[in-house]
Image (cartoon, rainbow, N blue to C red):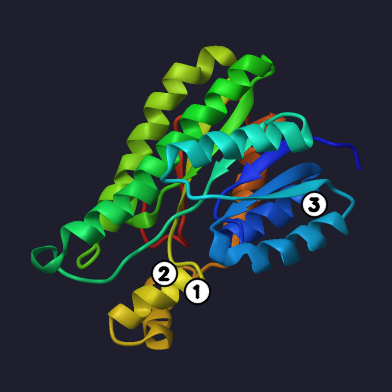
Amino acid sequence: MDQKGISLVTGAASGIGKAIALRLADDGFDIALNDLELSKGKLEVLNQEISQKGRRTTVILGDVSQEADVKRLVNSTVQDLGGLDVMVANAGIVTKAAPIQDTSIGDWDRTLSINARGVFLCYKYAAQQMIKQGRGGRIIGASSLVGKQGFAMVSPYAASKFAVRGLTQSAAKDLGPHKITVNAYAPGFIDTAMLNFFGDGFGGAEEYKADRAKETPVRSIGQPKDIASLVSYLASKESHFITGQSISVNGGIYFD
């Protein structure tokens, strides 16, 4: 398979990030894999899996909320793989389910530092590299269903995902003249560890997932590969006329 370009995926050790990395490798991209130090073992296993597909990979540990780390992520991707064509700012967290009156400043700051500041830093330094290369690019971030309609008990998470939508729209206007598109994916209920975490905060993960499936028009929750398939298209050359969008992938539980 011809090499389509070089992608950097943050939060790649598991869940949606892992699915995206595997899909982009199948599409023909070489992949830089990022996550925190504690996920090093998972990244090494994923690195081997992608290498077996015939793609070049590199593992770059780092915290996306730290500017120096994000600079290093981009620079190391360029040094190890030869450039950067697709940035997927996927890394994100949720702290705990609590009403706003019981939400701590610590939970607010930690959530926003990773989910909003981290995406901003990834957009910024990916954009600088892509402009320098002069061949355009694709920048893709992680919003959410709760970045379009706030939910009770998760105010920091919802605020951070609303922020990604604004960042994405503004960045799309800034970077369009450089042939760089900027979009985000907005997952609904996807079968990941984060959804289990949400469910535990609402009385039990399995019951929570079953209830959400019943509420969804397609009568199921999604899988990480459902998000990866959208990212695959947004990373492609065919998506050149789509920018500034935060695209819902939610089984119809919320209509834009």
Residue at left offset 59%, top offset 57%: 17
Q: Which mark is residue 26?
A: 3
Q: Label 3 vs label 1: CA separation?
A: 26 Å
Q: Which mark is residue 216?
A: 2
Q: Label 2 vs label 1: CA separation?
A: 6 Å
Q: Amino acid at mark 2?
A: Thr
Q: Are there few (<14), some (14-19), or many (20+) residues within 10 Å of tag 3?
A: some
Does residue 64 appear anywhere in the picture?
Answer: yes
Q: Which mark is residue 220?
A: 1
Where residue 61 appears, as percent x and y from the top left, is 60, 52
Counting residues from the N terminus, which is met first, the one under dot 3 or under dot 2? 3
Q: Are there few (<14), some (14-19), or many (20+) residues within 10 Å of tag 2?
A: some
Q: Which mark is residue 172?
A: none
Does residue 14 appear anywhere in the picture?
Answer: no
Counting residues from the N terminus, which is met first, the one under dot 3 or under dot 1? 3
Q: Amino acid at mark 1?
A: Ser
Asked if the residue under mark 1 is in contact with the one under mark 2, i.e. CB atoms within 8 Å, the reply is yes
Residue at left offset 67%, top offset 68%: 41
Where residue 103 appears, as percent x and y from the top left, is 16, 64
Q: Secondary structure at mark 1?
A: loop
